[in-house]
Every structure is written in C-alpha cells, then in structure tokens.
C-alpha cells in the first residue's frame, strides 16, 4: 500500500511542496505563520476554482485560452450592474455572474462540439472577443472601491469559523468537481473522450455533449470567479485577470495533467495550484525583485514538470521490467 | 429452421465515391459461430459498424429476432444485445481495466453516483470466468497487447449480449493466446450466444466456425457450412480465382553477384552470416521469431552497427553506417510494420509515394514538381494496382491492403538495386498478396535482387530461388528452390539438423 502511494506522481508533488515551504521558511521567518498561510490560500482560491475548469477542458485534450477574459467580462458586467443598480440583492448578483459565465462558456463549447473547431482556435478567438467586450461595456473606465457597496465588497471577505467565503467557495468548487469527475458517468466519460475518442464513440458516449460540458462548466466557474475577483480587489478593470489563462494551464500541467488529454487527478491539480500559490507568495516574501519573479516562476514550473516526467518514466520502466520477469 | 437472431437483408452503405456495401444478406442463429470472410476492403468491417450502430445504412434492413430495428448509435445496438470487439484497439490506455470494461455504461448507485465497488466485483467475476490473470486496477497502458485484447473481450461480455462480433481478434495474439481465445468462443457458444468471427486466416475459420458468409467488393457472394466447404471453394469465392494462381513465380535467369556479406556478426544477436545475392534473384530468409533474421537486415541497412564482418556491393567493399548511406548505395528496406513505419496517413497517395524522392523530382531541387510526382505515382500506383478514386486521395481513407501497396510503391520509386522485404505479405488478404507476389516477379525480371524475410512457408517455397534458414542467430541450412521442402526447412529452423 505504502509503496503504491510512493509511486503516485501526486506524492512527488507533495514532497516538492513541503521541500519548498521548508526552504522558504529558512530564508524568511515571516513566511511560516498562520496569517500568511491564510493569505496564500485566499490568493490561490480564485486560481484553484478556474484551474478545476481548465483541468476538465484539458482532460478532453482541449485548452481554454479565454478564461481570463471570461473572468474579466463577467466581473466587469456585474460590477457595473451593481454600480448603477445597488438595489439588486447580492445573491441575485451571484446567480447572474454564473449565468453570464455559463453563456460565455457555452458559446465556446458549442463552437467546439457542434462545429468541430479545435479548442485552441475557438478560445483564441473568444479570448479577443470577450476581452474586447470588457472595454465596450465599461467604456475603458474602472469600477472602483467607492462605487461598490460594503455588502458587495464583503462577499469574498466574510466567512465563518475563520474560513473566508472565498476560500469556502474554492473548497466547495474543488469538492464538487472532484466528485463530478470521479463519481459520475459524465465525469468519467470526459476521461474517456480525452483518452481515446474513437473508442468512446464505439461504446456509445455522446461526444457532442462531452465536448461541450467542460467549456460550459469552466465558463460558469469563471463567471462566479469574476464576481469574487472584482469584489476582493474592490476594483473592476479592463485588464482584470490578464494572463490568468496561462496560470491555470500551468497549475494543471504542474499537477500532472496530461496535455494530450485523458489523464490527471483533482488532487494533482490542487497540489499544482498550491505550488504556484506558494511560489508567488514566497518570491515577494524573500524580496526577489519583481523583474525576476516571472522568469523564476516559469523556471520552477519547468523543473516541476521535468521531475514529474522523469518519475513517471521510471515507474513505467519498472512495470515493464516486472512484467517481463 | 430455427429463427435467426440477427438477419441483414439487402443492406447498402455508400460513402462518397465508394460503395462499401452493395446489397449484402447475412444471418446468424443463436449458439452459432459464424465466420465472415472476405479480402481487405470487401466490406466486412463496414458491416460490423452497421450492426453496432457506428454507421447507419444507406438502404436495407436489419432484423433482430424477426423484428426490424434501427441502430441510431452504439448505445442502441448495445442495448439490443450486440457488442463488438473492433479491429482497431479501442482501449483507454490511461484508465484502469475496470474503467475500460465499464466506460459508457458505468454502474450507478441509486443516488446517481458511480458504484466503483460493484464494478470492481463484476470485472473480477468476468476475469475469473475467462480464467484470466489480470489486475482489475492495472492501467491498460501497462498491459501487453494480448492482455489488452482480453480486456476488449471482457468489455464486450460486460454488456448482457446475445451477439458478440470479433473483428480480426487473433491478429495480435500468439499461438497460445489464440487457443485461449478459441476456448472463450466455445464457452460463449455453449451459453447460446452467437459469435460473428472475422478473419482472413482460413485455418482459424476451419478451427472455430460452424457457418460462413463470403463478401467480395461489398457484395454478398455466398454462404455455407464450413465443414462441407473445401479450402479451394472458399478461396475461389473470396478472390474469384483458384489457389494455384497465387504464387506466380517467374523464371528469371540470374545474373552476376550484386551483393555479398561475409562473416557478419553482431554480439549477442547473430554470428558468421555469409550469403550472396544475384541479379534477378529472390533469396528467401526463413526462421522462427527470434532467430535473428530481421536483426541481420537491420545491420545491413545501417539501422544497427555490425560488430564484425564485411559487406560487398557489386564486388566492392562498402561501409554502411546509417540508412541514408544504404539508400545511396541502392539498398532499400521495407520494414515489417508498414502501417506504422511506412505510410503517412494524413497525406495523399502522391505525397506518400514521392516522399523519399521529392528532392530529385523538384525543379532546381527546390520547387515541388507536381506533374512529375503524379507521373511517378501513376507509374507505380498502376503497376501495383492501387485502388483509389484519384492519386490525390488521402491514404487514411484507403483499405489496409491498398495502404500497404502505397508503402511498397514508395520504396520502389527510389529505384533500388537491392530490395529487402521484411514479411512483405504479413496480415494482408489473398488478392493483395497475389498482387505483391506478381510484382516481385516483375522486379526480378528487371534484374533487381531481393531478400525476402517471411514466416510463411508457402510463400518462401513459392517465391524464392534460394533459401537461407536461420536458427538462433546462425545460418542453419541453405537450399536451392529444387532441394527445398516444407519438412526440411522446418527441421532446420527448429535446430533438428
């Protein structure tokens, strides 16, 4: 049993994460305290949610480049609505944000599944369209803190038992989609379609539905994240969540999700998200110049993936050798 | 006569430009093993795809227990009790055995979540029933090819089915594994299930099937009891001509020695290999798997390096360090796994055939010369009788036999002086084989020297001028065409000399 755990790539990631935390703590005593960890978790909550969506898209061998734009458009739309109609109750705003995201994601999904256009091209296009709409609806201006009510701004910050609503939403999101992927037919069929599309067709999986679902779900998540994002940072801007698509892809890849589809685990993605969160936080903590941060981030991602690949190859060889004995 | 479980009447399936099936009748009764026979491209796989709901017929009827049915999708066909093991391996490599078995019809708990426990149990029960030792939790990518096939069979049985279709189930199995498969088929038969067995190996048909139906060029040719039909009759139905025409050996007067190897050795694989090849000669290389035949050829072609020995071309000693040098010296090597190593499926016939010589054909060696390419493709394509609507047709849309001909054409277009063929007709149907053999005869007439590796004795005996038999990395015996007999060759190959 223990041997089995050791061989899992999640374990390698976990060791890497602990190793990183120890190293950083040695350099910066401020890093290792509860308040800072709560910060890291809050900071990575938004990433975790969208990464779960991106994870599902990558499982069907797709990629969603439009997530950042979806977050920005949904966030800007609800922020504007709130600014001009503060009487609309918060829970309605929450539902509306999800609905907006749902529509944006569905548009991606329909183009991919019904017209059979490759996801990278569809989402490259909609990334531009959605981001362009942010400028159109806002007229290039911001929605700033003083234009938002306290109830709006407190949505992500409030909470109970010392857990912020934001973190709570992320935990819920990971659990729901974790169960979805492991314990529902549609979830397993997502793995199937990504692993072998022809075989999926032969066993009667509805390819159109399964190729649509991940984009729709990702969009819905992005809608909610958009609201939480503008509320948390108390500002909705045209460049909100710019470059966020790459971070979500990075989290998945670091978490061991195969970019070719059909392989990856929720736990892996979660560890990938945490690893990125810790790195982001630590680079500021140990006073690394922001000029260096991006490069270092990229380097650490590559190192994580290389270690993972090597470990995977070694277990593969081990299994083959054992079979030949 | 008892009622038919499945009956197909006058079924037609047209694709743009191709009549894949053109009025086929077929019926199968419960407890029957029914062989569906026909050459590649005869329409067997298309019929399977119609029965399993992957395709929908252009015209015609499918009757299940006397009632007309329509299979809109694989789901409806499976629910009606038909499951298939397709020719292409349709596993999910990243997923476990359990999940491969239940993909598309996972067992759910009352509240709608997947019941992993019950799926594991059922998989275990099926594995036990078939007496197979596979870990249900193993990922399929870590299983051997034979084990993957077993997973496919278990997948088919996990549906509550009456009809099991096996499309070329033995092509990747060893003799021992084929025996296990027969055992499974007999058990299914005992349970009253109908098995549709597709194979182009007639000995398998005689071993396992009760009844047969022959298709040719998408048409129904005939049917009958296997016991009552002779090999000649079935083959004649398949190809429309008789068996004696299959090895059209052309007598060619042999010229001088063009190729010679002396004391070729590769540590651990083979040693002291000496032979020579003349103009217009077909030299057969026979040996069991692992005897080192292919390894010798790979060293000669520069894929692998030799430890010792010398190679002479036209009496001149040569050094071949890589395949490019081999090609330059007029050697061509057609590997065994042609579909994987040979053809680029996403390219058309013309592009495939001219791939190795595209530079020579190009204007000023830079700008593509489509006219010239077409001329070369036309020349070799028609000589090999490649069946296609045009030379611009994508190779992936061709039948398996025609894909193999494309690869042959590609290597022949390099105008080799010495051609090494590794299992030139393995896994292809009788008429394609005949076309390849006929073409080899033609090449011999054009003074080409050929080395033919083959595991099929009739082919070795029928085509070779001289025969080299290898056993455990050494040459065990040499025969001329006149001396050779099946018995002598087998004895030498198994070390009984």
Image: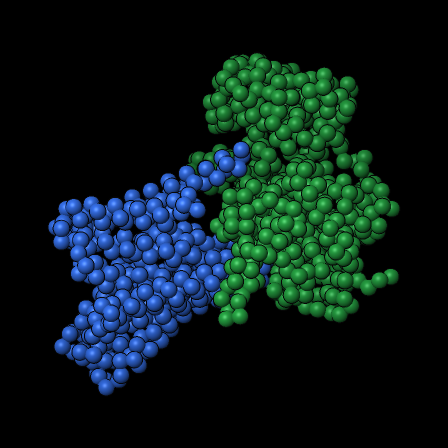
Residue B448 appears in the picture as rendered: no
Question: Which colour represents chain B?
Answer: green
* Rendered residue at 47%/22% (across/down): B321
- Is residue B278 rendered to the left or right of residue B37? left
Q: Nearer the viewer, residue B286 or B446?
A: B286
* Rendered residue at 25%/67% (across/down): A163
Q: Is residue B150 above or below residue A134?
A: above
Q: Is residue A147 above or below residue B155?
A: below
Residue B226 picture location, percent across and down: 82, 47
- Is residue A77 rendered to the left or right of residue A323? left
Residue B226 appears in the picture as rendered: yes
* Rendered residue at 45%/40% (across/down): A316
Residue B138 picture location, percent across and down: 51, 47
Q: Nearer the viewer, residue B15 or A97?
A: A97
The image quadrant of residue A245 is bottom left
> Tell me, what colour scheme is on the image?
by chain
Residue B445 picture location, percent across and down: 69, 26
Quarter holding the N terminus of chain B is: bottom right
- Is residue A275 rendered to the left or right of residue B75? left
Q: Nearer the viewer, residue A98 or B215?
A: A98
Residue A285 picture location, percent across and down: 14, 53
Quarter holding the C terminus of chain B is: top right
Which chain is blue in the rendering?
A: A
Q: Nearer the viewer, residue A139 or B141?
A: B141
């Amino acid at each position: 049993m223990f041997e089995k755990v050791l061989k899992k790539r999640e374990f390698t990631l976990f060791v890497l994460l602990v190793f990183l935390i120890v190293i950083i703590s040695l350099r910066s005593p401020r890093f290792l305290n509860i308040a800072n960890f709560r910060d890291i978790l809050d900071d990575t909550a938004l990433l975790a949610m969208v990464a779960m969506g991106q994870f599902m898209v990558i499982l069907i061998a797709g990629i969603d480049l439009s997530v950042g734009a979806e977050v920005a458009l949904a966030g800007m739309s609800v922020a504007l609505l709130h600014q001009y109609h503060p009487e609309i109750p918060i829970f309605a705003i929450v539902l509306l944000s999800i609905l907006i995201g749902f529509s944006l994601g569905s548009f991606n999904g329909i183009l991919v599944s019904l017209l059979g256009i490759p996801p990278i091209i569809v989402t490259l296009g909609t990334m531009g369209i959605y981001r362009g709409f942010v400028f159109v609806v806002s007229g290039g201006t911001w929605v700033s803190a003083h234009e938002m009510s306290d109830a709006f701004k407190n949505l992500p910050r409030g909470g109970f038992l010392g857990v912020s609503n934001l973190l709570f939403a992320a935990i819920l999101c990971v659990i729901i989609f974790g169960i979805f992927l492991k314990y529902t037919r549609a979830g397993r069929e997502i793995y199937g379609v990504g692993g072998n599309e022809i075989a999926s067709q032969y066993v009667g999986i509805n390819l159109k539905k399964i190729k649509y679902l991940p984009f729709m779900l990702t969009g819905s998540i992005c809608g909610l994240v958009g609201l939480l994002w503008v509320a948390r940072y108390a500002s909705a801007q045209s460049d909100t969540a710019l470059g966020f698509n790459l971070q979500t892809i990075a989290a998945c890849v670091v978490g061991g999700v195969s970019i070719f589809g059909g392989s990856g685990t929720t736990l892996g993605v979660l560890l990938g998200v945490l690893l990125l969160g810790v790195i982001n936080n630590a680079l500021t903590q140990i006073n690394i110049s922001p000029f260096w941060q991006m490069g270092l981030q990229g380097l650490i991602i590559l190192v994580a993936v290389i270690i993972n690949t090597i470990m995977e190859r070694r277990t593969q060889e081990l299994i083959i050798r054992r079979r030949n004995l | 006569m008892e009622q038919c479980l499945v009956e197909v009447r006058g079924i037609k399936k047209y694709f743009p430009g191709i009549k894949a099936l053109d009025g086929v009748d077929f019926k199968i009764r419960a407890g029957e093993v029914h062989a569906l026979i026909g050459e590649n491209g005869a329409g067997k796989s298309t019929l399977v795809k119609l029965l399993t709901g992957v395709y929908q017929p252009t015209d015609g009827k499918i009757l299940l227990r006397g009632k007309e049915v329509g299979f809109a999708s694989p789901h409806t066909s499976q629910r009606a009790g038909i499951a298939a093991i397709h020719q292409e391996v349709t596993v999910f490599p990243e997923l476990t055995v359990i999940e491969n078995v239940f993909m598309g019809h996972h067992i759910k708990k009352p509240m709608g979540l997947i019941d992993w426990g019950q799926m594991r149990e059922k998989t275990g029960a099926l594995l036990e029933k078939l007496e197979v030792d596979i870990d249900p939790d193993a990922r399929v990518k870590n299983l051997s090819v034979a084990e993957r096939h077993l997973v496919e069979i278990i997948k088919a049985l996990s549906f509550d089915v009456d009809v099991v279709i096996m499309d070329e189930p033995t092509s990747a199995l060893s003799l021992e594994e084929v025996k296990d498969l027969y055992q499974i088929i007999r058990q299914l038969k005992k349970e009253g299930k109908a098995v549709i067995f597709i194979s182009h190996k007639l000995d398998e048909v005689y071993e396992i099937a009760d009844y047969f139906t022959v298709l040719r060029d998408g048409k129904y040719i005939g049917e009958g009891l296997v016991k009552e039909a002779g090999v000649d009759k079935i083959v004649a139905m398949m190809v429309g001509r008789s068996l004696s025409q299959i090895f059209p050996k052309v007598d060619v007067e042999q010229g001088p020695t063009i190729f010679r190897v002396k004391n070729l050795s590769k540590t651990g694989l083979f040693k002291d290999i000496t032979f020579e090849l003349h103009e217009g000669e077909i030299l057969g290389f026979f040996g069991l798997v692992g005897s080192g035949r292919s390894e010798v050829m790979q060293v000669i072609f520069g894929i692998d390096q030799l430890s010792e020995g010398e190679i002479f071309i036209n009496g001149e000693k040569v050094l071949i360090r890589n395949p490019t040098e081999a090609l330059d010296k007029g050697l061509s090597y057609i590997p065994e796994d042609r579909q994987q190593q040979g053809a680029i499926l996403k390219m058309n016939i013309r592009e495939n055939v001219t791939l190795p010589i595209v530079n020579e054909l190009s204007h000023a060696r830079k700008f593509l010369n489509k006219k010239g390419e077409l001329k070369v493709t036309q020349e070799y394509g028609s000589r090999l009788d490649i069946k296609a609507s045009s030379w611009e047709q994508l190779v992936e849309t061709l039948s398996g036999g025609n894909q193999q001909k494309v690869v042959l054409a590609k290597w022949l277009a390099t105008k080799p002086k010495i051609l090494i063929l590794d299992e030139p007709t393995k896994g292809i149907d009788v008429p394609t084989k005949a076309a390849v053999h006929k073409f080899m005869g033609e090449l011999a007439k054009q003074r080409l020297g050929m080395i033919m590796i083959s595991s099929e004795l009739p082919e070795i005996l029928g085509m070779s001028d001289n025969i080299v038999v290898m056993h455990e990395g050494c040459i065990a015996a040499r025969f001329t065409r006149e001396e050779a007999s099946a018995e002598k060759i087998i004895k030498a190959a198994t070390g009984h000399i």
